[in-house]
Image (spheres, grey):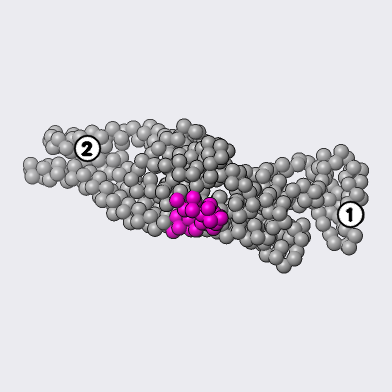
C-alpha cells in the first residue's frame, strides 16, 4: 500500500513524499525511523509506477535541459541533491516532470541510486543519459556531468530544430500542391469533361487521358483518399516499430543522392558525441561503443560498432585498428581515431569530430533545401500546367467549332 506523507524533520523543515507500507502503523514506523514527525499521512489509491501521460504530457528536451542546468547550478553553489530536488518540486508545474521529481525524491530517501529513476523511463532518457548519471554518481562528479549534459542536450535540440525548420517550407509546398491537384481533379476536371460529353465534341487524346484519370480519381476519392492515408500511416508505423521497416528505410536513405551524405554524417556525429561524453565520464571503451551503437540510428553503423567491440577490441585489437577494418566510416574518422588513441586524446578528438560533423550537417541541410525548393516548385508548376493545358486546349477547340 502506498502512503503520501507530510512531515517535519528535526530542524522543523517540512518535507513530503510517498512511501510503501503494509498499513498506517507501518508507515508511521518508517517515518519514526527517519526521525520525521508526521503532520499528515494519507493512503494513495494507486501507486504511480511511471510517468503518466494523462494530462501530464511527456518529458521533452527543454525539460531535460532545464533540469540538468538547474541541478548543475545548485550543486555548484553547494546545495545538496535532495534540497535541489525539493526546490524543483515546489517550483515545477508540469505534471509529468513533477511526478518524475517526486519519484526521484522517494528513491533518494530510500537510499537508492539517483540514476535508477531515469533508467525506468527509457522513452525519455536515453542509455547515454542514464550511464553518464550512473558514472557521475559513482565518481562524485554530478555537477560537471550535469553541465556537460545540458550543453549536449542544447546542441542536439538546436540541430533538430534547424532540421525541422529547414523542412517546413518543402512540407508547405507539398501540402499546397496536393490541395491544388485535389481541387483540379475532383472539381474542375469533372465539370469540363461533362461539358464535352454533353456537346458531343471529341477532345484531343492527351485531354481524354487526363479527363479519364481525373474522373476516375474524382469518382473514387472516398476510397482513394483513406487508402493513401492508411498506406502512409502504415509505412511510418513500419519504419518506427519494425526491424524490417527500419532496414528498408536505411536502405532508401543510404542510396538516395544528397540525403545519403546527411544521413551518414548524422550517424557519425551521434557516435562521436556519445563516445566523447561517455569516455569523459570514465566509462570503458567497450561499454561506450555498445551504447553508441544504440544511438547512431543507422543499421550499418550500429553493426559496424558492434563488430569493433566483439571482433576487434575483445580479440586484442587496438581501437584504431578495429575502426580501420570498418569501411563504413570515413577515412578521416578512422585515421583520427587511430592517431588520437596513440596520443591519448581520444575523448577530445571525438568531441572535435562531433562539432565538425554538426557544422557539416547544418550546411548540407541548408544546401539540400535550397535545391529542393525550386525543384518542388518546378514539379508543382509542371503538373498544374499539364492539367491546365488539358482543359484549355479542348475549350479553345470547342469555342472555335462554333
* Closest to the observer, 354 or 388: 354
Considering only vertical position in the picture, is 367 above or below 286? below
User: Residue 309, how many percent across, how many down?
Assistant: 55, 40
Considering only vertical position in the picture, is 89 above or below 328? below
Tell me the number on the disc at residue 36: 1
Could you tell me which residue is drawn at 26 percent across and 51 percent down?
378
Q: Is residue 213 left or right of residue 396?
A: right
Q: Is residue 283 left or right of residue 392?
A: right
User: Residue 43, how many percent across, how many down?
Assistant: 83, 44
Task: For the N terminus, give its image quadrant.
Answer: top right
Label 1 sits on a secondary structure element that is loop
Q: Quadrant of residue 144?
A: bottom right
Helix, strand or loop: magenta stretch: helix
Residue 134: in magenta span: no
Residue bearing the label numbered 2: 210
Q: Which residues are magenta?
A: 335-359
User: Residue 243, how many percent across, how many down?
Assistant: 49, 33
Task: For the C terminus, give its image quadrant.
Answer: top left
Residue 345: in magenta span: yes
* Closest to the observer, 4 or 286: 286
Could you tell me which residue is drawn at 75 percent across and 64 percent down?
79
Amino acid at each position: 500500500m502506498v502512503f503520501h506523507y507530510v512531515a517535519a524533520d528535526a530542524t522543523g523543515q517540512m518535507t513530503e513524499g510517498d512511501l510503501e507500507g503494509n498499513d498506517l502503523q507501518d508507515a508511521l514506523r518508517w517515518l519514526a525511523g527517519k526521525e520525521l514527525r508526521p503532520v499528515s499521512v494519507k493512503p494513495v489509491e494507486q501507486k504511480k509506477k511511471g510517468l503518466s501521460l494523462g494530462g501530464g504530457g511527456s518529458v521533452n528536451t527543454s525539460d531535460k535541459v532545464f533540469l540538468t542546468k538547474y541541478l548543475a547550478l545548485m550543486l555548484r553553489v553547494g546545495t545538496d541533491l535532495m534540497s535541489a530536488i525539493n526546490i524543483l518540486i515546489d517550483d515545477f508545474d508540469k505534471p509529468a516532470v513533477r511526478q518524475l521529481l517526486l519519484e526521484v525524491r522517494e528513491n533518494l530517501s530510500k537510499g537508492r541510486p539517483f540514476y535508477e529513476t531515469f533508467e525506468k523511463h527509457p522513452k525519455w532518457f536515453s542509455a547515454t543519459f542514464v550511464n553518464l548519471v550512473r558514472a557521475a554518481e559513482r565518481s562524485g562528479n554530478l555537477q560537471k556531468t550535469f553541465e556537460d549534459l545540458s550543453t549536449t542536450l542544447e546542441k542536439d535540440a538546436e540541430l533538430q530544430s534547424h532540421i525541422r525548420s529547414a523542412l517546413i517550407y518543402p512540407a508547405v509546398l507539398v501540402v499546397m500542391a496536393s490541395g491544388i491537384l485535389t481541387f483540379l481533379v475532383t472539381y474542375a476536371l469533372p465539370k469540363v469533361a461533362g461539358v464535352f460529353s454533353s456537346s458531343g465534341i471529341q477532345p484531343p487524346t492527351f485531354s481524354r487521358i487526363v479527363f479519364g484519370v481525373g474522373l476516375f480519381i474524382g469518382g473514387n476519392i472516398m476510397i482513394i483518399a483513406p487508402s493513401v492515408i492508411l498506406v502512409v500511416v502504415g509505412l511510418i508505423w513500419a519504419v518506427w516499430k519494425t526491424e524490417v521497416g527500419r532496414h528498408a528505410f536505411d536502405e532508401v536513405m543510404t542510396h538516395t543522392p544528397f540525403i545519403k551524405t546527411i544521413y551518414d554524417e548524422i550517424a557519425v556525429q551521434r557516435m562521436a558525441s556519445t563516445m566523447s561524453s561517455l569516455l569523459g565520464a570514465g566509462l570503458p571503451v567497450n561499454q561506450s561503443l555498445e551504447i553508441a551503437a544504440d544511438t547512431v540510428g543507422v543499421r550499418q553503423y550500429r553493426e559496424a560498432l558492434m563488430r569493433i567491440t566483439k571482433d576487434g577490441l575483445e580479440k586484442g585489437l587496438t581501437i584504431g585498428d578495429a575502426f580501420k577494418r570498418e569501411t563504413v566510416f570515413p577515412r578521416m574518422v578512422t585515421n583520427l581515431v587511430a592517431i588520437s588513441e596513440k596520443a591519448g586524446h581520444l575523448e577530445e578528438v571525438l568531441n572535435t569530430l562531433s562539432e565538425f560533423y554538426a557544422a557539416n550537417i547544418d550546411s548540407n541541410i541548408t544546401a539540400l533545401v535550397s535545391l529542393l525548393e525550386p525543384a518542388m516548385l518546378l514539379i508543382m508548376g509542371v503538373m498544374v500546367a499539364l492539367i491546365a493545358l488539358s482543359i484549355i486546349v479542348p475549350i479553345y477547340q470547342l469555342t472555335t467549332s462554333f
